[in-house]
């Protein structure tokens, strides 16, 4: 019985190895331009070995059923014998082993969903400094006149905003009509928890009295990314800023290769 178990294990490993080689060949052909194949093979081989071993030893190995004794053929029966129990058992084990090996490898090669932090870094092309206007992006209001009446933070964007502050030096900016509005905006952002992560402080929220003032802020800060809703500012800065994101409910034609479009900041990062 021990020899039979060892033989079954060896057969399973052989089939697993054959199926794995096909999977790894496909993976290498796709990833060879981005990663060193030797590194991929080492990582994947080690991970697969762990998963395979865990799956193998996790499976309960109860006592094997005793094979029923094969009865002698009755007299007068034809000379053609039906398949023996041992043949049927071997075929069943072989099919089961192939299925188990395929399931382990397929599960290992399932795509892993990236985290929001990984998406943010990928989308921002590892940019380290970001400037962003408030109206229409972080705030529900769309004009300085509306801000004089109320300030409403878009809570749907907070998760993305706080994730950006973990990897980037973020500056928020907006045109306001008076000092009272500035205080309202800062209080609303503080109440929403924007300043709790430590990545964004009140000193990095900038206010100006004209649209050209916001353009000057961006030029002085020289960010890797600028996020705005004003198409004129996007156009003016396209020659000076590496990347820009134009937030607009209607998709406009992409004037330059470094300007991206999205209905909202959270949609750009796939959070909606």
Image (tube, rainbow, N blue to C red):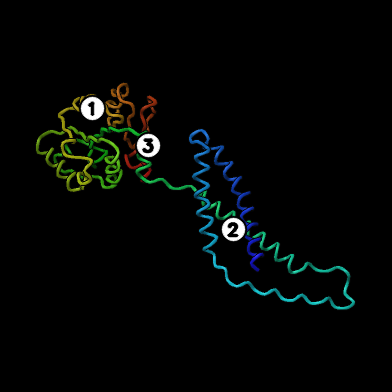
- Comparing labels 1 and 2, the label whose residue is closer to the camera: 2
Badge 3 marks a residue whose secondary structure is helix
Residue at the spot of label 2 = 100
Per the model, the C-alpha gap separating discs 1 and 2 is 57 Å
48 w.r.t. 95: above or below: above
Quote the CA–CA distance across marks 3 and 1.
21 Å
At horizontal 30% and vertical 31% (from top left) the residue drawn is: 225
Residue ID for mark 1: 221
Badge nearest the viewer, 2 or 3: 2
Q: Earlier in the sequence, mark 3 or mark 1?
A: 3
Residue holding disc 3: 123
Above-or-below relation of 51 to 36: below
Horizontal arrangement in the rendering, residue 107 relative to residue 132 (left or right): right
Is disc 3 surrounded by few (<14), some (14 to 19) or many (20+) residues within 10 Å? few
- Picture quadrant where residue 125 is located: top left
Q: Nearer the viewer, residue 178 or 196?
A: 196
Q: Estimate the x, y position of residue 102 in percent, counting from the top left.
A: 59, 54
Residue 118 visible in rendering: yes
Q: Give percent across and percent down for residue 72.
A: 82, 76
């Amino acid at each position: 019985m021990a020899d039979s178990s060892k033989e079954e294990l060896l057969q399973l490993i052989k089939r697993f190895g054959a199926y794995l080689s096909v999977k790894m060949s496909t993976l290498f052909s796709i990833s060879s331009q981005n990663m060193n194949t030797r590194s991929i093979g080492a990582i994947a081989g080690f991970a697969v070995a762990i998963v395979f071993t865990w799956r193998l030893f996790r499976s309960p190995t109860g006592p094997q059923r005793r094979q029923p004794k094969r009865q002698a053929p009755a007299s007068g029966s034809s000379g053609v014998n039906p398949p023996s129990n041992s043949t049927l058992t071997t075929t069943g084990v072989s099919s089961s082993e192939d299925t188990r090996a395929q399931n382990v490898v397929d599960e290992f090669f399932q795509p892993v969903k990236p985290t929001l932090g990984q998406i943010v870094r990928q989308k921002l092309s590892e940019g380290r400094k970001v400037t962003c206007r408030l109206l229409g992006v972080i705030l529900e209001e769309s004009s300085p006149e509306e801000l004089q009446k109320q300030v409403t933070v878009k809570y749907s964007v907070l998760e993305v905003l706080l994730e950006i502050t973990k990897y980037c030096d973020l500056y928020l900016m907006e045109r306001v009509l008076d000092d009272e509005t500035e205080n309202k905006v800062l209080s609303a952002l503080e109440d929403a928890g924007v300043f709790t992560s430590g990545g964004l402080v009140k000193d990095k929220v900038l206010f100006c009295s004209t649209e050209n003032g916001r353009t000057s802020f961006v030029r002085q800060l020289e960010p890797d990314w600028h996020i705005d809703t004003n198409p004129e500012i996007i156009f003016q800065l396209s020659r000076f800023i590496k990347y820009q994101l134009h937030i607009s409910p209607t998709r406009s034609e992409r004037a330059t290769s470094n300007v991206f479009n999205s209905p909202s900041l959270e949609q750009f990062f796939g959070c909606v």
